Image: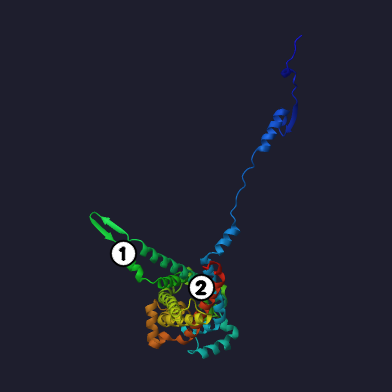
């Protein structure tokens, strides 16, 4: 009699598994082992998406964004208050209507009602918010960068270049020490903001000076584009940059210089709101007086096509003004401009410093 060993007597049980392709017979032990492996298998890694909300929150907390927003809010609040003076100033500069402030004011009210004093203010608000934000943000950034560069060059040795037996030392400390970070930052602020927002300035002037030809923003954009293409929206860019450079440089330099000198004289760390208003107004007056003839020429070039005559360049525009009105014509509308520029500059700096105190409070050293 043949005896069977335990291995031979052990019976295997099978499990029936069915799929879409048919029936498969598999031992239960193998199936249990497969299930165990599947159970212990680590889960596939989850796709990690960037936390956009956190990144945006961190961005909004940066100093640059705080200064950018402070400039935008300050510009919007200032223009909302001073829009009537801006309308009168623009009309007088380009030679439309009365030659004095009161007469121009009366003409606007009689022809267009009180709303006429805010003609073009919508586009003016759209213009000033990005312009002021870019301008003040650029000024603060470039000023810090220039100051840091000067300190770095003072600490490090000057670079040198050796050619054979000749050794050339480049002393940039002397050059950088002559450059004022505030003046350089002011020039950069004016240039960058002008390049970014000049088309809005063109639209604002067209809506202000000729509301009958350009009754609203969409019609103004279509007309200007159909007549001159993209170049029409940048009409007068070159004289604008030429006029902006001395104005912006002087404007920021005067404000920072007077602010620092006043604080040193009074032995105080910061200005009050009233002092900011006064110093800002004086800096605007000084800068406007120096660069005003260039402003007159710029406005003539920008809206000259409306009167059927457009000077070919800034020098021709200045010559035309002197020929027609004498040297005094270069300062036509200067009084109205000062009435607009002085409060505008003062209010802008006051609001800007106030918004910086609010938005940058967490970044100030304790």
Quick one: label 1, few (<14), some, or many (20+) residues within 10 Å? few
Q: Which mark is residue 171?
A: 1
Taking the spot 35% from the left edge, 71% from the top edge, the residue there is 178
Q: Secondary structure at mark 1?
A: loop
Q: Is residue 320 above or below residue 61?
A: below
Q: Closer to the N terminus: mark 2 or mark 1?
A: 2
Q: Which mark is residue 331?
A: none
44 lies left or right of 138: right
80 lies left or right of 175: right
Q: Secondary structure at mark 2?
A: helix
Quick one: label 2, few (<14), some, or many (20+) residues within 10 Å? many
Residue at the right extreme?
1
Taking the spot 55% from the left edge, 64% from the top edge, the residue there is 61
Percent coordinates x, y for residue 159 in the rendering? 32, 59
Which label sits in the foreground, 2 or 1? Answer: 1
Taking the spot 41% from the left edge, 68% from the top edge, the residue there is 147
Residue marked by disc 2 = 132
């Amino acid at each position: 009699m043949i005896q069977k060993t335990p291995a031979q007597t052990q019976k295997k049980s099978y499990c029936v598994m069915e799929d879409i392709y048919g029936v498969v017979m598999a031992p239960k032990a193998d199936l249990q082992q497969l299930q165990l492996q599947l159970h212990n298998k680590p889960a596939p890694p989850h796709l990690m998406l960037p936390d956009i909300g956190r990144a945006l929150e961190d961005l909004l907390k940066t100093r640059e964004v705080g200064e950018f927003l402070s400039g935008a809010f300050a510009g919007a609040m200032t223009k909302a208050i001073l829009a009537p003076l801006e309308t009168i100033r623009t009309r007088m500069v380009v030679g439309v209507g009365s030659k004095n402030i009161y007469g121009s004011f009366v003409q606007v009210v009689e022809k267009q009602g009180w709303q006429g004093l805010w003609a073009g203010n919508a586009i003016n608000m759209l213009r000033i918010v990005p312009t002021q934000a870019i301008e003040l943000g650029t000024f603060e950034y470039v000023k810090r960068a220039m100051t840091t560069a000067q300190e770095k060059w003072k600490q490090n040795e000057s670079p040198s270049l050796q050619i054979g037996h000749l050794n050339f030392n480049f002393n940039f400390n002397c050059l950088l020490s002559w450059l004022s970070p505030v003046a350089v930052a002011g020039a950069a602020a004016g240039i960058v903001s002008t390049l970014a927002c000049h088309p809005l300035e063109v639209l604002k002037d067209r809506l202000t000076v000729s509301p009958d030809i350009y009754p609203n923003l969409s019609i103004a954009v279509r007309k200007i584009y159909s007549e001159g293409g993209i170049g029409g929206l940048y009409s007068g860019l070159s004289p604008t940059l030429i006029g902006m450079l001395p104005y912006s440089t002087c404007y920021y330099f005067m404000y920072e210089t007077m602010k620092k000198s006043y604080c040193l004289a009074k032995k105080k760390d910061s200005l009050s709101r009233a002092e900011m208003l006064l110093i800002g107004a004086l800096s605007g007056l000084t800068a406007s007086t120096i660069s005003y003839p260039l402003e007159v020429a710029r406005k003539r070039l920008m809206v000259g096509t409306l009167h059927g005559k457009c000077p070919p360049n800034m020098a021709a525009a200045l010559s035309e003004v002197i020929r027609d009105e004498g040297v005094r014509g270069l300062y036509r509308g200067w009084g109205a401009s000062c009435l607009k520029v002085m409060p505008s500059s003062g209010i802008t700096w006051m609001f800007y410093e106030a918004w910086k105190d609010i938005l940058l409070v967490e970044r100030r050293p304790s």
